[in-house]
Amino acid sequence: MTLLGEDLRGKRVLVTGSSRGIGAAVGTAFASLGARVALHGSGGSDAAAKLALALTAGGTEVYAVTGDFRDPRAVESAVDAAVQALGGLDILVNNAGTMVGRVPLERIGDDFLDEVIDLNLRSVVVACRRALPALRAAGGGAIVNTVSISARTGGSPGSSIYSASKAFVSTFTRSLAAELAPDRIRVNAVSPGTIDTDFHQRYSSPEKLAATAARIPLGRLGTAEDCVGAYLFLASDALSGYITGQVIEVNGGQLMA
């Protein structure tokens, strides 16, 4: 942790979708290691601002930015606000996104399709595009995207569009890694399994989660904190400076089951 802390200290980091769950845990970890952090939350919640205030009170430099990431213009504005507040950008963590709802194929309407794609797919592309000049100006950096185990498994019934959007981000990660390598920008992704956050409290029943946990080799669902190390590892040049285009699976052995 000493090595990791020294490497990330002072780095300028934007974590999207960081008002709760995995994003909040990741943003808090970066701040605890001395990084300068911008936390992002949707415009309908002040959770990111409250977390930023609490972390700032602990002696770290943390800012809050807002934006509804279903709107590409809001994505651009949030990235711009983070770059301005931090004075540049070294690390972009694209974590914003959600399933929106479990909808079977026959009930998938155009509005639902647009919402899931805009939030989970388009926002990642727009955020990367908008952050690119700042990352280049920094002389390189790291992009860490959040995908999902469902990108490989296809997910469970009703999650087809969400799962497909995460599969897009996995492929986009690998493609972008090759494209941005000459700029010394590494691009990787973290793929959480079934993590016990409000995501699954909203979209999965207690019975479904219990059945899933019973099939996981480590015998439990994951926590947001279980995912943090993978993000810090991929963001750290000292620990993963020769790693790009990879997707790290964090699922307690769920893919083996």
Image (tube, rainbow, N blue to C red):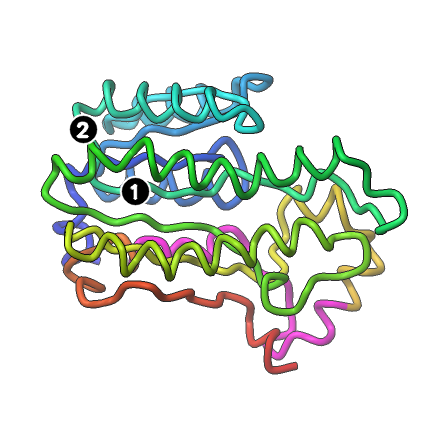
Please tell me whether mark 1 or mark 2 is closer to you in this view: 2
Side of 89 relative to 147 (left or right): left
Q: Nearer the viewer, residue 88 or 175?
A: 175
Q: Which residue is mark 1?
A: 30
Q: Is 220 included in the stretch rendered in magenta?
A: yes
Q: Nearer the viewer, residue 195 or 88?
A: 88
Q: Amino acid at mark 2?
A: Gly
Q: Nearer the viewer, residue 201 or 103?
A: 103
Quadrant where the image shows the N terminus: bottom left
Q: Position of residue 257 (x, y in %)?
A: 66, 81
User: Within 10 Å of the Cα at label 2, are there few (<14), some (14-19), or many (20+) other Cα atoms?
Assistant: many
Q: Which residue is mark 2?
A: 88
Side of 107 relative to 250 (left or right): right
Side of 4 relative to 220 (left or right): left
Q: Position of residue 74 (x, y in %)?
A: 47, 20
Q: Is 84 included in the stretch rendered in magenta?
A: no
Secondary structure of the residue carrying numbered label 1? helix
Write the start and end of the magenta stretch as one range. Answer: 212-233
Q: Residue at x 85, y 50 (%)?
A: 104
Q: Residue furthest bottom?
A: 256
Q: Position of residue 145 (x, y in %)?
A: 42, 50
Q: Residue furthest right?
A: 106
The image quarter in which residue 118 lies: top right
Q: Position of residue 47 (x, y in %)?
A: 52, 23
